Amino acid sequence: MLSLVDLFSGAGGFAEGFRRAGFRVLLGVDNDPAAIRSYKANFPEAIALAMDIKEVTGALIERLVGRPDVVIGSPPCEPYTGANPRRMKNPIDRLYQDPAGQLVLHFARIVGELKPKVFVMENVPGILDVKGELRRIFAEAGYPEVYFNILAAEDYGTPSHRLRVFISNIRIKPRKHPRRITVEEALRGLPEPGSSDVLNHELPPLSPRKARRIARLRWGQALIYYEGAEGRRYPNLIRLDPRRHAPTVLGSSRFIHPYEDRFLTVREQARLMGFPDNHVFLGGKDEQYNQVGEAVPVPLAEAIAWEVRRFLEKES
């Protein structure tokens, strides 16, 4: 069975897609205590390392699980995204000076040490500002051919928008889903919030004042806006349009139910990212929302995984 190591694993959305495509998940690494607890709960067969990636080496991973066929990972996107008002002006500084931005270098370092047949690194399209440097870094790691695969999650069966770049040593161009999945379809069949039949499905608190403001929102309207890099404004607390796919799910985002005057539960937001209902999120409520919003959507991850699997089977 094809094997996988997952760096910056979060709660395991990326790995879940690969597991669905028949990969054996050997190991996940994350320095977030709640996220790595969630990872272990969802992938009991894998080793879950609660470690800073800077302290992880290819030799350590090889000693624990051997050399994997594939390495995947999602280094933090905050240094590169335009939604971050504190993003450094110089793109090169984002990669080499920002401590979070430097984590991309550690992904490349571990890939160079493990020499997997395929690597796939996910990030925001803003990282393409340092495309030339990334080519050089991965070439030094032993991968002279690098592809920047830009994919929209809604094209692959995810009920929410998400445009991301998947940097890999192979071309990744999955077959698109025949149609877009709507919010109404994604939320269908869930019991009332608070039901013990579904995990992570408790109502988040809502003040009477905010409830009154929410009641006035129409589909697609936002309760608040915040400022990102270069003065650009971004909406949050959006009432979802049931007839469309949802906007991008972020760790900081909270959505308003299309028909009820309340926020979505963690489970409902997880549905918008294509997570199965048995995928558990541990930790405090904000940590759970963050784990959902920072994941690679499961249907997109699975579409990528099948492309990787087809490549590896053709090569063998």
Image (cartoon, rainbow, N blue to C red):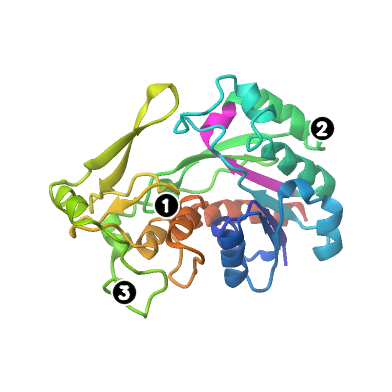
- In this rendered view, identify the residue nearer to me: 141 or 30: 30
Q: Which residues are magenta?
A: 118-128
Question: Which quadrant does the C terminus fall into?
Answer: bottom right
**Residue identifier under label 2:** 140
Residue 99 horizontal/vertical position (percent): 66, 35
Q: Residue at x 41, y 60 (%)?
A: 270
- In this rendered view, identify the residue nearer to me: 276 or 50: 50
Q: Is residue 13 above or below residue 83?
A: below
Q: Residue at x 81, y 58 (%)?
A: 61
SS label for mark 3: loop
Q: Residue at x 60, y 34 (%)?
A: 148
Q: Which mark is residue 177?
A: 1
- In this rendered view, identify the residue nearer to me: 92 or 282: 282
Residue 54 horizontal/vertical position (percent): 75, 45
Closer to viewer: mark 1 or mark 3: 3
Closer to viewer: mark 2 or mark 3: 3
Q: Amino acid at mark 2?
A: Glu
Q: Work out how far the residue at label 2 is from the one at label 1, CA to CA, in angstroms.
A: 36 Å
Mark found first going from the N terminus, 2 or 1:
2
Q: Judge left or right: residue 242 versus residue 127.
A: left
Q: Is residue 162 above or below residue 198?
A: above
Residues under numbered marks 2 and 1 in contact, where contact means CB atoms less than 8 Å apart: no
